[in-house]
């Protein structure tokens, strides 16, 4: 183990090392239950050839990153290597020795806002715009990176969010192995919406954690982000000023007698045709104004469905993240509220699919058939769109 006396929540690694000089094939790692720990397997298995005491061994290391969930003494046992059956003996478990971990309690005096983060962390906050219209979302990307149990961290404290409506629209988590251990990165996408024009400030985000190397609590905080909110453009109730009258030249009188060869029987159609043409243009313009939102919604739906089908092909967790982003983009293209997916009726199949998608992404030890779930999401999105057209 890398640390036999970690703090509660502090990352350490447990490594099982298997020496094989006999060329065993199909040996399987049997993990411990790791009760009392969050766990992440960063490296899988690593093998090297080592010469020891005059013999060559294939040395296999299986490393697991552990995060204690509470203070106290915990014994890790039950791990080992399952050796396959041979002509000389049956399959058997070669057990690893049990190890004892003394987990220390965190010290008293945690600052307000401490949520259990233990390790070393960095906080980055970036907005995608410095101005927006009333009701238009400003997308803010909040990234927390560190050696603690980043996957379980909530959104950092936003402070005073007055004058803003905020909605978390996407959450992503990634890990990478570095020299100081497993480093996790969790990224939140947050939509900030204001219903009043003027200069606004997205409040500073505050993150509190315990640094086991320093033995002290630390606070990191982002800067406020100024945003200018413009008044929404007015589309109704605006009168167009009428230009002042301009003196027109006198009109010449129209002759009341027609040449003998003029087709007098058809002349009445000219003003009538002009009137019908003007009426047709007005009706067409009115219908176009009514149908344009529907046409835009249909185009957005076709685009979203095509992207969902493409996203289902890789069949990875990134496909699920892409699926949620596609629906968020659809809502933005159709001027829906930033939290429209949260407003779906509880009995709506689309809401059920989104809930299972989130569970697959963020629930620990989640196992899901990604292509199947995305196909169900596409089907639910189809039915939901049909209901929108009917309403």
Image: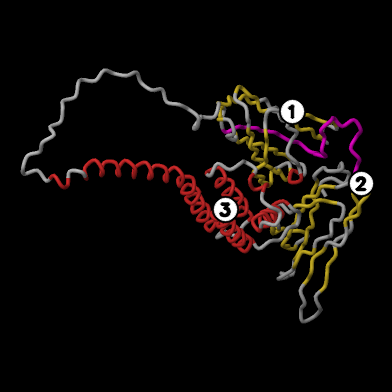
Q: Which label's residue is closer to the chain start, 3 or 2?
A: 2
Residue 358, image x and y in percent? Answer: 69, 52
Left or right: residue 227 compared with residue 31:
left
- Per the picture, the main secondary structure of the magenta-coloured stretch is loop
Q: Which label's residue is closer to the chain start, 2 or 1?
A: 2
Residue 54, image x and y in percent? Answer: 75, 61
User: Badge 2 local density, few (<14 within 10 Å), some, or many (20+)?
Assistant: some
Q: Which label's residue is closer to the chain start, 3 or 1?
A: 1
Q: Secondary structure at mark 3?
A: loop
Is 111 one of the magenta-colored residues?
yes
User: Badge 3 local density, few (<14 within 10 Å), some, or many (20+)?
Assistant: few
Q: Which residue, given by chain and number where applicable, does mark 2 sit on?
A: 102
Residue 246, image x and y in percent? Answer: 29, 18
Residue 143, image x and y in percent? Answer: 67, 37
When asked about the image quadrant of residue 242, the answer is top left
The residue furthest front is 256
Q: CA distance from mark 3 to mark 1?
A: 39 Å
When asked about the image quadrant of residue 131, the answer is top right
Q: CA distance from mark 3 to mark 2?
A: 62 Å
Q: Point out the stretch of residues depicted in magenta.
A: 103-128
Q: Nearer the viewer, residue 165 or 105?
A: 165
Mark 1 and mark 3 in contact (Cβ < 8 Å)?
no
Q: Nearer the viewer, residue 62 or 279?
A: 279
Q: Which residue, given by chain and number where applicable, does mark 1 sit on?
A: 160
Q: Secondary structure at mark 2?
A: strand
Above or below residue 353? Residue 297 is: above
When asked about the image quadrant of residue 332, the answer is top right
């Amino acid at each position: 183990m890398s640390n036999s006396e970690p703090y509660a929540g502090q990352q350490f690694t447990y490594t099982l090392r298997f020496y094989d000089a006999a060329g065993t094939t199909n040996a399987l790692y049997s993990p411990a239950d790791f009760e009392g720990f969050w766990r992440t397997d960063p490296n899988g298995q690593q093998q090297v050839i080592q010469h020891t005491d005059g013999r060559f061994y294939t040395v296999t290391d299986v490393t697991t990153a552990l995060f204690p969930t509470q203070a106290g003494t915990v014994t890790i046992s039950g791990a080992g290597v399952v050796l396959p059956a041979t002509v000389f003996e049956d399959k058997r478990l070669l057990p690893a020795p049990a190890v004892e971990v003394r987990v220390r309690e965190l010290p008293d005096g945690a600052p307000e806002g401490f949520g259990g983060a233990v390790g070393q962390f960095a906080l980055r906050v970036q907005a995608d715009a410095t101005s927006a219209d009333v009701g238009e979302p400003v997308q803010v990307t909040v990234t927390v990176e560190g050696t603690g149990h980043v996957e379980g961290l909530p959104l950092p404290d936003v402070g005073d969010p007055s004058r803003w409506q905020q909605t978390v629209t996407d959450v992503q988590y990634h890990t990478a192995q570095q020299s100081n251990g497993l480093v996790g990165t969790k990224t939140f996408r947050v939509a900030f919406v204001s219903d009043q024009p003027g200069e606004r400030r997205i409040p500073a985000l505050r993150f509190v954690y315990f640094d086991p190397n320093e033995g002290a609590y630390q606070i990191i905080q982002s800067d406020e982000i100024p945003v200018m909110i413009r008044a929404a453009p007015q589309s109704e109730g605006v009168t167009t000023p009428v230009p002042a009258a301009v003196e027109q030249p006198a009109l010449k009188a129209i002759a009341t007698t027609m040449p003998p060869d003029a087709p007098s029987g058809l002349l009445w159609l000219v003003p009538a045709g002009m009137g019908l043409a003007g009426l047709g243009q007005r009706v067409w313009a009115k219908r176009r104004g009514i149908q344009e939102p529907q046409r835009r919604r249909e185009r957005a739906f076709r685009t979203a469905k095509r992207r969902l089908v493409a996203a289902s092909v890789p069949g990875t967790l990134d496909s699920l993240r892409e699926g949620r982003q596609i629906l968020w983009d659809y809502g933005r293209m159709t001027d829906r509220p930033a939290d429209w997916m949260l407003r779906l009726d509880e009995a709506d199949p689309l809401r059920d699919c989104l809930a299972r998608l989130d569970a697959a992404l963020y629930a620990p030890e989640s196992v899901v058939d990604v292509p199947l779930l995305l196909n169900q999401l596409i089907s639910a999105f189809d039915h939901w769109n049909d209901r929108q057209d009917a309403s």
